[in-house]
């Protein structure tokens, strides 16, 4: 492994970096995919418009199929996170530390639109401060670790909103790893 780029990652001990009320909010934010009704035509149209804005810079040939995919498989993202706390985080906790390779942790510094549905602006600010601290600790865990905060990026779309920052991080990691190849 030449280097490691973490794009606004989670962490098995995330709640230790968060304000106390985040554990309760975390429980409230959990959605049971099976209990979710199908999207209405109005919700689909609103989501289509939001995705069109997010992917506005993408060519039509890629943007439209991607939007269609998101709208057809929206339940998948709910299912993907169901076992984070019950299985995945425990596996990570016992999987060992980060490797001693160049590491860049990209942190979304902008508001989290998902969190905004469940918490006050002050609680979101505190949560984002916790994420920054968590990512700083991850970067500090290895000798060649670095955290980069992207102030205007949101967690869900950092890679889309700031693709140049992601590309720059990859190039920087490759440059740092070059002597070790």
Image (cartoon, rainbow, N blue to C red):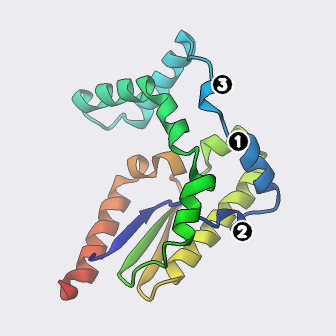
The secondary element bearing badge 1 is classed as helix
What is the distance, in whole Å, between disc 1 and disc 2 at their CAs? 18 Å
- Residue 113 location, quadrant: top right
The image shows residue 102 at horizontal and vertical percentages of: 36, 80
The answer to whether any part of residue 1 appears in the image is yes
Left/right of residue 174 with respect to residue 93 in the rendered view: left
Residue matched to label 3:
35
Q: Earlier in the sequence, mark 1 or mark 2?
A: 2
Q: Earlier in the sequence, mark 1 or mark 3?
A: 1
**How many numbered callouts?**
3
Depth check: give the residue in front, 106 or 26. Answer: 26
The image shows residue 169 at horizontal and vertical percentages of: 34, 68
Left/right of residue 175 with respect to residue 73 in the rendered view: left
Quarter placement of the N terminus = bottom left
User: Nearer the observer, disc 3 or disc 2?
Assistant: 3
Vertical relation: 40 (above or below) 125: above
Residue sitting at 70 percent across and 58 percent down?
127
- Point out which mark residue 148 bears: none
Residue matched to label 2:
16
The secondary element bearing badge 3 is classed as helix
The secondary element bearing badge 2 is classed as helix
What is the distance, in whole Å, between disc 1 and disc 3 at their CAs? 14 Å
Vertical relation: 25 (above or below) 15: above
Residue matched to label 1:
29
Vertical relation: 118 (above or below) 46: below
Q: Earlier in the sequence, mark 3 or mark 2?
A: 2
The answer to whether any part of residue 122 appears in the image is no
Question: Mark 2, residues whose alpha carbon is within 10 Å: few (<14), some, or many (≥20)?
Answer: few
Vertical relation: 26 (above or below) 13: above
The image shows residue 106 at horizontal and vertical percentages of: 46, 65
What is the distance, in whole Å, between disc 3 and disc 2 at their CAs? 30 Å
């Amino acid at each position: 492994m030449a280097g490691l780029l973490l794009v606004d990652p989670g962490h098995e001990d995330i709640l230790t970096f968060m304000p106390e009320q985040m554990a309760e909010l975390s429980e409230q934010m959990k959605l049971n995919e099976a209990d979710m009704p199908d999207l209405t035509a109005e919700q689909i149209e609103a989501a289509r418009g939001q995705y069109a804005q997010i992917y506005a810079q993408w060519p039509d040939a890629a943007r439209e199929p991607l939007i269609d995919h998101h709208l057809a498989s929206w339940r998948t993202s709910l299912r993907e996170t169901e076992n984070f706390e019950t299985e995945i985080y425990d596996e990570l906790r016992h999987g060992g530390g980060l490797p001693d390779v160049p590491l860049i942790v990209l942190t979304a510094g902008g508001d989290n639109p998902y969190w905004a549905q469940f918490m006050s602006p002050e609680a979101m600010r505190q949560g984002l401060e916790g994420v920054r601290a968590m990512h700083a600790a991850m970067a500090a865990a290895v000798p060649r670790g670095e955290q980069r905060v992207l102030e205007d990026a949101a967690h869900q779309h950092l890679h889309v909103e700031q693709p140049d920052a992601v590309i720059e991080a990859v190039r920087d990691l490759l440059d740092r790893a070059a002597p070790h190849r």
